[in-house]
Protein backbone atom coordinates (compact mmCIF):
# COMPACT_ATOMS: atom_id res chain seq x y z
CA UNK A 1 0.00 0.00 0.00
CA UNK A 2 1.18 3.53 -0.77
CA UNK A 3 1.85 6.07 1.95
CA UNK A 4 -1.34 7.44 3.50
CA UNK A 5 -1.49 11.23 3.17
CA UNK A 6 -4.97 11.77 4.62
CA UNK A 7 -5.32 10.99 8.37
CA UNK A 8 -7.60 8.02 9.11
CA UNK A 9 -10.14 10.10 10.99
CA UNK A 10 -13.81 10.51 10.05
CA UNK A 11 -15.17 13.87 11.18
CA UNK A 12 -18.84 14.76 11.47
CA UNK A 13 -20.82 17.61 13.01
CA UNK A 14 -23.78 17.37 15.36
CA UNK A 15 -24.89 20.77 16.60
CA UNK A 16 -28.07 21.61 18.47
CA UNK A 17 -27.96 18.84 21.06
CA UNK A 18 -30.93 16.82 19.82
CA UNK A 19 -30.82 13.00 20.08
CA UNK A 20 -29.63 11.33 16.88
CA UNK A 21 -32.48 9.71 14.92
CA UNK A 22 -32.25 6.08 13.87
CA UNK A 23 -31.34 7.05 10.29
CA UNK A 24 -28.27 8.97 11.51
CA UNK A 25 -27.15 6.17 13.82
CA UNK A 26 -27.51 3.70 10.96
CA UNK A 27 -25.13 5.78 8.85
CA UNK A 28 -22.58 6.11 11.67
CA UNK A 29 -22.77 2.34 12.22
CA UNK A 30 -21.86 1.84 8.55
CA UNK A 31 -18.72 3.97 9.06
CA UNK A 32 -17.69 1.74 11.96
CA UNK A 33 -18.43 -1.43 9.99
CA UNK A 34 -16.39 -0.59 6.89
CA UNK A 35 -13.73 1.64 8.49
CA UNK A 36 -13.02 -0.13 11.81
CA UNK A 37 -9.51 1.32 12.18
CA UNK A 38 -10.60 4.94 11.65
CA UNK A 39 -11.08 7.33 14.54
CA UNK A 40 -14.61 8.78 14.42
CA UNK A 41 -14.77 12.29 15.84
CA UNK A 42 -17.97 14.20 16.56
CA UNK A 43 -17.77 17.99 16.58
CA UNK A 44 -20.36 19.88 18.60
CA UNK A 45 -20.71 22.86 20.93
CA UNK A 46 -18.49 21.24 23.57
CA UNK A 47 -15.36 21.01 21.39
CA UNK A 48 -15.90 23.59 18.63
CA UNK A 49 -16.49 27.34 18.89
CA UNK A 50 -19.59 28.05 16.81
CA UNK A 51 -19.11 31.77 17.47
CA UNK A 52 -15.69 32.00 15.82
CA UNK A 53 -17.16 33.20 12.51
CA UNK A 54 -20.17 35.51 11.81
CA UNK A 55 -21.76 33.22 9.18
CA UNK A 56 -21.70 30.21 11.47
CA UNK A 57 -22.80 32.19 14.52
CA UNK A 58 -25.80 33.61 12.62
CA UNK A 59 -26.83 30.14 11.41
CA UNK A 60 -26.46 28.79 14.95
CA UNK A 61 -28.54 31.58 16.51
CA UNK A 62 -31.26 31.00 13.91
CA UNK A 63 -31.09 27.24 14.63
CA UNK A 64 -30.27 26.45 11.01
CA UNK A 65 -28.41 23.32 12.06
CA UNK A 66 -27.78 22.17 8.49
CA UNK A 67 -25.87 25.38 7.67
CA UNK A 68 -23.66 25.57 10.78
CA UNK A 69 -21.39 22.75 9.48
CA UNK A 70 -20.92 24.46 6.10
CA UNK A 71 -18.21 26.68 7.57
CA UNK A 72 -17.20 24.37 10.43
CA UNK A 73 -16.30 21.37 8.26
CA UNK A 74 -13.98 23.41 6.03
CA UNK A 75 -12.31 24.95 9.07
CA UNK A 76 -11.95 21.56 10.79
CA UNK A 77 -10.61 19.82 7.71
CA UNK A 78 -8.15 22.60 6.87
CA UNK A 79 -6.69 22.41 10.38
CA UNK A 80 -6.86 18.67 11.06
CA UNK A 81 -7.24 16.81 7.79
CA UNK A 82 -9.09 13.50 7.52
CA UNK A 83 -12.43 12.59 5.95
CA UNK A 84 -15.64 14.52 6.55
CA UNK A 85 -19.08 12.91 6.21
CA UNK A 86 -22.53 14.37 6.68
CA UNK A 87 -24.72 12.27 8.96
CA UNK A 88 -26.91 11.14 6.05
CA UNK A 89 -23.99 9.40 4.32
CA UNK A 90 -23.90 5.59 4.36
CA UNK A 91 -20.50 4.00 3.72
CA UNK A 92 -20.50 0.77 1.70
CA UNK A 93 -16.77 -0.07 1.58
CA UNK A 94 -13.45 0.78 3.24
CA UNK A 95 -12.36 4.39 2.66
CA UNK A 96 -8.65 3.66 3.26
CA UNK A 97 -7.60 3.72 -0.45
CA UNK A 98 -8.80 7.33 -0.65
CA UNK A 99 -6.34 8.27 2.09
CA UNK A 100 -3.48 7.80 -0.39
CA UNK A 101 -4.60 11.02 -2.11
CA UNK A 102 -3.84 14.60 -1.05
CA UNK A 103 -7.55 15.42 -1.20
CA UNK A 104 -10.77 14.18 -2.78
CA UNK A 105 -14.33 15.32 -3.46
CA UNK A 106 -17.13 14.09 -5.70
CA UNK A 107 -19.71 15.33 -8.15
CA UNK A 108 -23.32 15.31 -6.94
CA UNK A 109 -24.33 15.93 -10.55
CA UNK A 110 -22.41 17.05 -13.62
CA UNK A 111 -22.97 20.65 -12.50
CA UNK A 112 -21.97 20.63 -8.85
CA UNK A 113 -19.38 19.17 -6.44
CA UNK A 114 -20.84 18.52 -2.99
CA UNK A 115 -18.79 18.55 0.24
CA UNK A 116 -21.64 17.15 2.34
CA UNK A 117 -21.64 13.77 0.61
CA UNK A 118 -18.06 13.32 1.85
CA UNK A 119 -14.60 14.69 1.16
CA UNK A 120 -11.10 14.23 2.47
CA UNK A 121 -7.83 16.13 2.59
CA UNK A 122 -4.44 16.57 4.16
CA UNK A 123 -4.34 19.46 6.63
CA UNK A 124 -3.32 22.87 5.35
CA UNK A 125 -4.11 22.60 1.62
CA UNK A 126 -4.41 26.19 0.24
CA UNK A 127 -7.51 25.47 -1.89
CA UNK A 128 -9.52 24.85 1.30
CA UNK A 129 -8.46 28.24 2.62
CA UNK A 130 -10.02 29.74 -0.51
CA UNK A 131 -13.25 27.87 0.17
CA UNK A 132 -13.31 29.13 3.76
CA UNK A 133 -12.96 32.68 2.39
CA UNK A 134 -16.30 32.23 0.54
CA UNK A 135 -18.05 32.74 3.87
CA UNK A 136 -16.88 36.33 4.30
CA UNK A 137 -19.30 39.26 4.03
CA UNK A 138 -22.37 38.86 1.82
CA UNK A 139 -20.93 36.16 -0.45
CA UNK A 140 -22.71 33.19 1.21
CA UNK A 141 -26.16 34.82 0.95
CA UNK A 142 -28.65 35.63 -1.80
CA UNK A 143 -31.91 37.58 -1.90
CA UNK A 144 -34.95 35.36 -2.57
CA UNK A 145 -38.46 36.86 -2.49
CA UNK A 146 -37.14 39.82 -0.54
CA UNK A 147 -35.45 37.66 2.12
CA UNK A 148 -31.74 37.01 2.62
CA UNK A 149 -31.19 33.25 2.30
CA UNK A 150 -28.14 31.03 2.82
CA UNK A 151 -26.52 29.81 -0.38
CA UNK A 152 -26.03 26.05 -0.19
CA UNK A 153 -22.35 25.17 0.30
CA UNK A 154 -21.91 23.01 -2.84
CA UNK A 155 -22.53 26.08 -5.02
CA UNK A 156 -19.93 28.12 -3.15
CA UNK A 157 -17.22 25.45 -3.20
CA UNK A 158 -17.91 24.55 -6.84
CA UNK A 159 -17.41 28.22 -7.75
CA UNK A 160 -13.90 28.08 -6.24
CA UNK A 161 -13.07 24.90 -8.15
CA UNK A 162 -14.27 26.49 -11.40
CA UNK A 163 -11.70 29.26 -10.93
CA UNK A 164 -9.03 26.55 -10.87
CA UNK A 165 -10.23 24.86 -14.06
CA UNK A 166 -12.99 22.44 -13.01
CA UNK A 167 -14.96 21.13 -15.99
CA UNK A 168 -18.67 20.69 -15.32
CA UNK A 169 -18.96 17.38 -17.13
CA UNK A 170 -19.01 14.96 -14.20
CA UNK A 171 -15.69 13.39 -15.20
CA UNK A 172 -12.78 12.34 -12.99
CA UNK A 173 -10.26 15.19 -12.82
CA UNK A 174 -7.60 16.69 -10.56
CA UNK A 175 -8.05 20.33 -9.56
CA UNK A 176 -5.60 22.13 -7.23
CA UNK A 177 -4.45 18.85 -5.59
CA UNK A 178 -8.05 17.61 -5.21
CA UNK A 179 -9.11 14.45 -7.04
CA UNK A 180 -12.71 15.02 -8.15
CA UNK A 181 -14.67 11.80 -8.73
CA UNK A 182 -17.79 11.02 -10.81
CA UNK A 183 -21.16 10.60 -9.08
CA UNK A 184 -20.91 6.80 -8.85
CA UNK A 185 -18.18 7.09 -6.17
CA UNK A 186 -20.01 9.11 -3.49
CA UNK A 187 -23.43 9.98 -4.90
CA UNK A 188 -25.01 6.93 -6.58
CA UNK A 189 -28.44 8.08 -5.41
CA UNK A 190 -30.27 10.38 -7.81
CA UNK A 191 -31.59 13.58 -6.21
CA UNK A 192 -34.43 13.79 -8.73
CA UNK A 193 -35.65 10.17 -8.56
CA UNK A 194 -34.22 8.72 -5.34
CA UNK A 195 -32.98 5.72 -7.36
CA UNK A 196 -29.68 4.17 -6.18
CA UNK A 197 -27.22 2.70 -8.71
CA UNK A 198 -24.20 1.17 -6.96
CA UNK A 199 -21.11 0.16 -8.96
CA UNK A 200 -17.74 -1.39 -8.06
CA UNK A 201 -16.44 2.18 -7.65
CA UNK A 202 -19.03 3.22 -5.05
CA UNK A 203 -17.68 4.10 -1.60
CA UNK A 204 -20.74 5.70 -0.07
CA UNK A 205 -24.36 6.76 -0.57
CA UNK A 206 -25.56 10.28 0.15
CA UNK A 207 -29.20 9.90 1.21
CA UNK A 208 -30.09 13.61 0.81
CA UNK A 209 -31.74 14.05 4.20
CA UNK A 210 -32.15 17.79 3.36
CA UNK A 211 -32.73 18.63 7.02
CA UNK A 212 -32.86 22.37 6.25
CA UNK A 213 -36.03 21.90 4.16
CA UNK A 214 -39.43 22.48 5.78
CA UNK A 215 -42.23 19.90 5.74
CA UNK A 216 -43.85 21.37 2.63
CA UNK A 217 -40.58 21.33 0.70
CA UNK A 218 -39.91 17.72 1.70
CA UNK A 219 -43.38 16.72 0.45
CA UNK A 220 -42.60 18.46 -2.84
CA UNK A 221 -39.33 16.51 -3.16
CA UNK A 222 -41.09 13.21 -2.39
CA UNK A 223 -43.75 13.93 -5.05
CA UNK A 224 -41.08 14.94 -7.57
CA UNK A 225 -39.17 11.69 -7.07
CA UNK A 226 -42.33 9.59 -7.29
CA UNK A 227 -43.40 11.19 -10.57
CA UNK A 228 -39.89 11.02 -12.05
CA UNK A 229 -39.57 7.31 -11.22
CA UNK A 230 -43.04 6.59 -12.62
CA UNK A 231 -42.94 8.64 -15.82
CA UNK A 232 -39.27 9.54 -16.37
CA UNK A 233 -37.68 12.87 -15.50
CA UNK A 234 -38.83 14.84 -18.56
CA UNK A 235 -42.49 13.83 -18.39
CA UNK A 236 -42.47 13.74 -14.59
CA UNK A 237 -41.28 17.35 -14.34
CA UNK A 238 -44.07 18.50 -16.68
CA UNK A 239 -46.71 16.69 -14.63
CA UNK A 240 -45.28 18.17 -11.42
CA UNK A 241 -45.41 21.66 -12.93
CA UNK A 242 -49.08 21.18 -13.84
CA UNK A 243 -49.88 19.94 -10.33
CA UNK A 244 -48.15 22.95 -8.73
CA UNK A 245 -49.90 25.38 -11.12
CA UNK A 246 -53.25 23.80 -10.26
CA UNK A 247 -52.45 24.06 -6.55
CA UNK A 248 -51.59 27.77 -6.93
CA UNK A 249 -54.81 28.33 -8.93
CA UNK A 250 -56.93 26.70 -6.22
CA UNK A 251 -55.20 28.79 -3.56
CA UNK A 252 -55.88 31.94 -5.57
CA UNK A 253 -59.60 31.20 -5.71
CA UNK A 254 -59.93 30.87 -1.93
Image (spheres, rainbow, N blue to C red):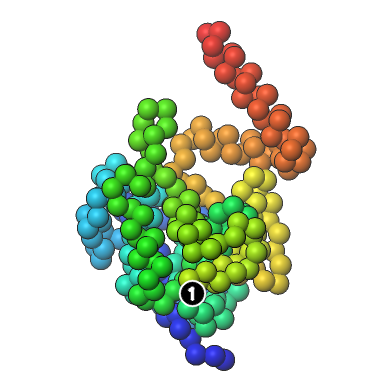
Q: Residues within 10 Å of mark 1 (few under 14, many from 20)?
A: some
Measuring from the top left, give residue 59's x and y in whole percent. Answer: 31, 46
Measuring from the top left, give residue 211's x and y in whole percent. Answer: 46, 46
Q: Is residue 42 visible?
A: no
Q: Decide if residue 78 is on the left or right side of residue 51.
A: right
Q: Assign a secondary structure to mark 1.
A: loop
Determine the image quadrant of residue 49.
bottom left
Measuring from the top left, give residue 102's x and y in whole percent. Answer: 47, 78
Q: Decide if residue 79 is on the left or right side of residue 183.
A: left
Q: Residue at x 30, y 60 (%)?
A: 44
Pick the front one: 170 or 211: 170
Is residue 153 placed above or below 82 in the rendered structure? Answer: above
Pick the front one: 55 or 247: 55
Determine the image quadrant of residue 138.
top left
Q: Residue at x 39, y 66 (%)?
A: 128
Q: Residue at x 44, y 52 (%)?
A: 156
Measuring from the top left, give residue 190's x and y in whole percent. Answer: 65, 51
Pick the front one: 124 or 7: 124
The residue carrying mark 1 is 177
Q: Is residue 15 visible?
A: yes
Amino acid sequence: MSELLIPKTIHYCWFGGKPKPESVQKCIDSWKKYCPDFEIKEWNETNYDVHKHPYMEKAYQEKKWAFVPDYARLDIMYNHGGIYLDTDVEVVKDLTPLCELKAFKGFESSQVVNDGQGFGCMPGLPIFKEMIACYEGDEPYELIDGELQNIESPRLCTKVLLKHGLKLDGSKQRIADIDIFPTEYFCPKSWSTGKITITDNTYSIHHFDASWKNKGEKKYIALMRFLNRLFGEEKGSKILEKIMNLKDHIKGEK
